[in-house]
Amino acid sequence: MDITEGLIYAERNNNKALAGLFARNLEDLGIEVNDPPEKGGVGSSDIGNVSQMTAAIHPYIRLGDATTHTPEFAALAGSEEGMIELNRAAKALALTAYDLCTDKEALREVRSEFDQWKAQRNEG
């Protein structure tokens, strides 16, 4: 494997099949799920680079009414309520990993979507 260091963040490829598994697990834990916007989003992250190599998601969890990257959000995130919500989200992620390990059809759908995206990307 070659590793190249740099500050370039690739565009995110959000795997819808994987996101669907995660959403179902959130709902099973009593967390309300809203569809993400079709386009847009703010910020940058190296998860975009990861999503070029394998199926990935970059979910957001609502925490009160505070806007992210504000002092109010930081205070809420560090509160007991914030820790409870973080724990529930971590459980949903763990359940999603479990789904991929135990449900061959779910894994096939996630991989198939990624492979199709990769093939289309390589055509263009």
Image (spheres, rainbow, N blue to C red):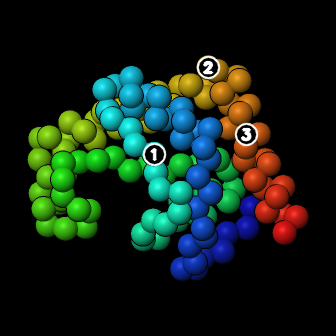
Badge 1 marks a residue whose secondary structure is: loop
In the displayed structure, 91 sits above or below 124; it is above
Q: Residue at x 67, y 69 (%)?
A: 3
Residue 27 as seen in the image, left or right of residue 113? left
Which of marks 2 and 3 precedes in the sequence? 2
Q: Nearer the viewer, mark 3 or mark 2?
A: 3
| Residue 73 image offset from top left, x and y in percent | 18, 59
Give the amino acid type for the residue marked by disc 3 in the picture: Arg
- Circles 3 and 1, Cβ within 8 Å, touching? The answer is no
Badge 3 marks a residue whose secondary structure is: helix
Q: How many marks do you count on the picture?
A: 3
| Residue 43 image offset from top left, x and y in percent | 42, 71
Q: Residue at x 62, y 38 (%)?
A: 17
Q: Which residue is mark 2?
A: 102
Tell me which corner region of the image, top left, top right, bottom left or bottom right, holds residue 112: top right
Give the amino acid type for the residue marked by disc 2 in the picture: Thr
Badge 2 marks a residue whose secondary structure is: helix
Residue 92: tell me if it is visible: yes
Give the amino acid type for the residue marked by disc 1 in the picture: Asp
* Residue 35 tag number: 1
Which of marks 1 and 3 precedes in the sequence? 1
Query: Badge 2 local density, few (<14 within 10 Å), some, or many (20+)?
Result: few
Query: Badge 1 local density, few (<14 within 10 Å), some, or many (20+)?
Result: few
* Residue 111 tag number: 3
